[in-house]
Image (cartoon, rainbow, N blue to C red):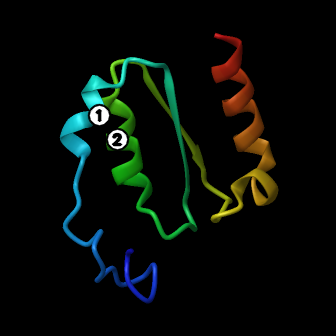
Amino acid sequence: MQGPSEFGISGKLEKWDVSAELPKIKTPTLVIAASHDTMDPEYMEWMSTQFPNGQFVLCPNGGHMCMWDDQEHYFPGLIGFLKQ
């Protein structure tokens, strides 16, 4: 659906953009980003501001598996969000 590689989208999802729909999601939403992932952390932080009840956690030492390689930031952020 996104093409042959996640690094160069060329499939049916290439022009699919639902960012305008994010404000409609009223459920508390946690967006977790990692500095060494392929998704831009600044964009993910912006996404968190679009949810009425959004929060953002950055794992500065993490990659795509930040729950493993940056537990120091991942788990406190997740647990803090869940305890609210």
Tell me the residue at 63%/64% (across/down): 64
Q: Nearer the viewer, residue 5 or 31?
A: 5
Tell me the residue at 40%/43% (across/down): 45
**Residue located farthest toward the top when viewing the structure as drawn:** 84
State the count of labels.
Answer: 2
| The disc label shown at residue 69, or none | none
Query: Label 1 amino acid?
Result: Leu
Quarter of the view holding residue 54: top left
Direction from residue 34 to residue 16 in the image, left or right: left
Direction from residue 63 to residue 7 in the image, left or right: left
Percent of width and height locating residue 8: 35, 84
Query: Disc 2 on helix, strand or loop?
Result: helix
Question: Label 1 near label 2: C-beta < 8 Å?
Answer: yes
Quarter of the view holding residue 34: bottom right
Residues at marks 2 and 1, CA–CA distance in whole angstroms: 8 Å
Query: Disc 1 on helix, strand or loop?
Result: helix
Q: Is residue 4 above or below residue 36?
A: below
Q: Is residue 42 above or below residue 77?
A: below
Percent of width and height locating residue 14: 25, 72
Query: Label 2 amino acid?
Result: Met
Q: Residues within 10 Å of mark 2 (few under 14, many from 20)?
A: some
Residue on which disc 1 sits: 22
The quadrant of the picture occupied by the C terminus is: top right
Tell me the residue at 24%/47% (across/down): 18
| The disc label shown at residue 47, or none | 2
Percent of width and height locating residue 27: 46, 19
Q: Nearer the viewer, residue 82 or 70?
A: 82
Percent of width and height locating residue 2: 38, 75
